Amino acid sequence: MGGLFGIVSKDDCVSDLFYGTDYHSHLGTRLGGMAVRNSRGITRSIHSIENSYFRTKFEPELGRFHGSSGIGVISDTDPQPLVARSHLGAFGIVTVGRINNMEDLVLSALGERRSFFDTNGGMVNPTEMVAKLICLESDFSEGILKAQSDIRGSCSMLLLTDRGIYAARDRLGRTPLVIGRRDGALAVSSESCAFANLGFETEGFLGPGEVVLLTADGWERCVAPGPRMQICSFLWVYYGYPASEYEGINVELVRNACGAALARGDDTPVDCVAGVPDSGIGHAIGYANGRNLPYLRPYVKYTPTWPRSFMPQNQSLRDLVARMKLIPVRRLIEGRRLLFCEDSIVRGTQLRNNTQLLFDRGAREVHMRPACPPLIHACEFLNFSTSRSTLDLIARKVIHSLEGTAVPDLDAYARSGSDQSLAMVEEIRGELCLTSLRYQQLDDLVAAIGLPKEKLCTHCWDGTSTG
């Protein structure tokens, strides 16, 4: 996925930019970048953070950054920020999203005798493509509108200019941007949790497609928000940090509500409830409170040296990280009927290994309650589950095995309680060696978030959201 942070200040902004960007490290593990503007121009730096932390890579070079405005990014897609020099002036740019019609945009540009220099594994850098689309127009606002209208998928961005920072949320608002204010400075961020320790108070959330210009004195709207929103539901389920809010709705409270919804009507006899750390914890607390059951930690996470297992692109490395960072507490496992809450089940590989480890440590039963429905469709908008085919998703793999060569009715599998859905869940339960498996119902997830379903992207589960 990825995250953005920008700041404009009456004083030097480098320290705030450094820490504000670092507060987005949970959104990616591949690349980090910062760019700062002063009277001499733009200074930027990009580092790989695959084998180290953002702070470790950038702290030694902070002394060469000076300026009152800057942008930062955590990216799992391409090296950023980029610095463009054009008829609009020199500007820095960072983006988050996914461009589905990249090949068409490249061919169109080449047909107009335009060229590309920054590459990403031999491919055109998506952020460079956005910059070139912006530069086709006569001002930044029109250029951003041009880019947003041409892109199929999603793209939120920050532009570091001589006037200030332009912040633009993607056309359907799939990724959030929030404005924070303190005396003498304004900030814009993907995650509101970046504000608290830097002294910013949340001022408001950008609407879908909205473009604003931030200066140290305030902000002005350049493009009004559009009428339709499709914010990613998975932000509350998994991606988002517990202290963050999107559309004014706190992540941890939603996870508690998800767990409470899973608990309603579930009378499975168990001895305790646990969360698969970290994102499953909030769901599990809600479940335990809902059933008045003890919450225990039969797994604890060793975080000092192990990165997130979800992000590494190599499957064997992902499995190694998952195995090594979760340490079982045998005395809380032996002889117990354990019920775990998890944010989701994607491939199921890690869960299968962890379930077997629990049984090996003496668990009597292992029950699983994912906080969202089965993932049936790969994400088309935010680079979530995009490096894998749909058959890498355990639900689709099971559907394929149940249907054989027949074309499956995916709507039937997505409908909770249908014969197809029940057969799929039972097959997944058996494959993962679980005592029982019950998924969250989509209606309950939507209710836990608290927004109307038409304002949420639920494509992963029911395939209904479109770009």
Image (cartoon, rainbow, N blue to C red):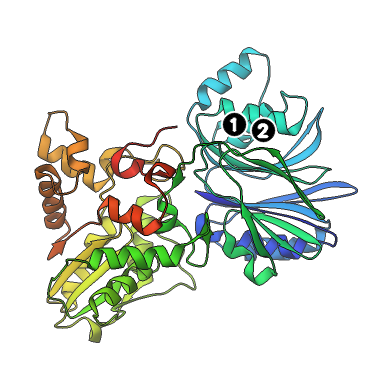
Residue in view at x 53 percent, y 58 percent: 248
Residue in view at x 30 percent, y 44 percent: 461
Residue at the spot of label 2: 144
Q: Residue furthest top?
A: 111
Q: Residue furthest bottom?
A: 331
Identify the image quadrant of residue 358: bottom left
Label 2 environment density (alpha carbons within 10 Å; few <14, some 14–19, many ≥20): many
On the image, the x and y values in percent for residue 347 come to: 28, 51
- Quadrant the C terminus occupies: top left
Above or below residue 235? Residue 289 is below
Identify the image quadrant of residue 293: bottom left
Label 1 environment density (alpha carbons within 10 Å; few <14, some 14–19, many ≥20): many
Residue 34 visible from this viewpoint: no
Q: Amino acid at mark 2?
A: Ile
Q: Is residue 140 left or right of residue 345?
A: right
Q: Amino acid at mark 1?
A: Gln
